[in-house]
Amino acid sequence: MPARRSHVHPSSVTDELAASLAALRTRLELPGEYPAEALAEAERVAQGPAVDGSDDAREDLTGLDFHTIDPPTSRDLDQALHLAREGDGFVVHYAIADLAAFVAPGGALDAEVRRRGQTIYAPDGAVPLHPESLSHGAASLLPDERRRAYVWRIALDAEGVRGDVRLTRAWVRSRRQWSYDEAQKEIDAGTAPDEVALLATIGPLRIAREAARGGASLNLPEEEIVEVDGGYELQRRAGLPVEDWNAQISLMTGMAAADIMLAAGVGILRTLPPADADALAEFRMKTRALGVPWPEEQNYGEYLRSLDPAAPGTAAIMVAATVLFRGAAYEPFDGAPPAQTEQAAIGAPYAHTTAPLRRLVDRWSLAICEAAANGREVPAWARESLGELPGIMQTTGALASRVENGAVDRIEAAALVGRTSEEFEATVVAETKGGVRVQLTDPFVTAVVAAEAQPGTVVRVRVESADIAEGTVALALVG
């Protein structure tokens, strides 16, 4: 699917947008520069030995050809993979950045990282969880650099069923940083090395295992804010197969981490309750109204996977399906497991464990899993502070959502400034309290219209107003 864009080019509009985005950061009180003491600590530990003394026992796996696959401009590289065949099955080595080697519990850096909770991405600059000396430097799995990592070794059989799991702290070296486009092209052409090319075999096997578990994914086209010609554009594109295959490696690792923590009786899970009967009935009714009814004999995961991303009604169905994915939480435990252990969309217990550069909770998951997997006591700092994590992650997650939504609103408004009274074709994607939500194709803008229309319907709308400072757009239905 080609990218759909909201163009922002005139310098006056660009300047107004920049000012509005800056005001948004101020209004939401985003963290600014790192405190001097925390910054100095980060720069010091970036050059020294592991703060927890783990280097002496660290395994040397620099002989394995690891690779990272990320957006092309990424520098905070959390994961690197190496795939291989073993007998009739496969072995996945998955290296995850080792932040416990850099962040001393109770230090100035630890305090600031806990305050931030996660990296917040904004078009006019990210607010990083860790200082760039770590996130873009010593802790990032950048190519051709010797780096500390937690390395998962996960065996799979010929059907992609997970077998033996091992976890160790090691030295690794990534051979190449791939973009998704590069990886897809070389896999398709048959020129990718085996340790990357096997994604095309293992990925579909794991997707089949997800289907067998009753798992489901909302594979909506990605909406990205991209800097272009000194301004910003909203781009929406369908993901490449390699992105789904790569995501399956991360999901598999998160499930392995959850199993280790549940067996150890201590840890923190990422949970999602099953959709209730009312939500399922509501979704089924909406699929019938949209002309693509959900068959009674299919679970909702199978149904969502069967949809054609290019079909006109798919966007509306995917929006309607969000009713099935509500109530995600972090559940810490020390002793008895929580009442809710499963992440219903995945169809298994699951833990966040593969993005420690960008998400605070992953440092805890990794430290707990590595100790438990190797028969050692869980580090006291991780065990004693488990209860703090849900509040931190919920608060900072809500802030990240407000930043993203506010930025998108302002860029959409900028795309329609000066176009008052112009008419555009749009698709109704959802009913809302104030009317219906419509999606313009070009420029790519989503807004609410005070009107009644069936989701999935193609309509014409007229621009009534656009305010960059407030990030608001007013549209009217034509006819």
Image (cartoon, rainbow, N blue to C red):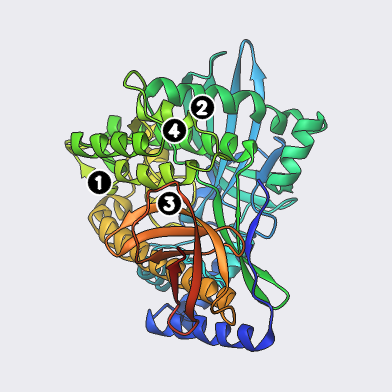
Alpha carbon of mark 4 to alpha carbon of mark 2: how far? 13 Å
Q: Earlier in the sequence, mark 2 or mark 1?
A: 2
Query: Do labels 2 and 1 touch, CB within 8 Å?
Result: no
Residue at 57%, 37% in the rendered image: 244
> Which quadrant, please, contains the C terminus?
bottom left
Q: Which residue is mark 4?
A: 304
Measured Cα–Cα span from mark 1 to mark 4: 27 Å
Closer-to-camera residue (31/71)? 71
- Give me the disc on residue 429: 3
Residue 330 placement (x, y as % from top left): 28, 49
Q: Quadrant of the N terminus?
A: top right
Q: Position of residue 320 (x, y in %)?
A: 36, 45
Q: Crowding at label 3, few (<14), some or many (≥20) Cα neighbours within 10 Å?
A: many
Residue type at tag 4 = Leu
Label 3: element kind: strand
**For the residues bearing labels 4 and 3, Cβ distance under 8 angstroms:** no
Where residue 278 sits, quadrant-wise, is top left
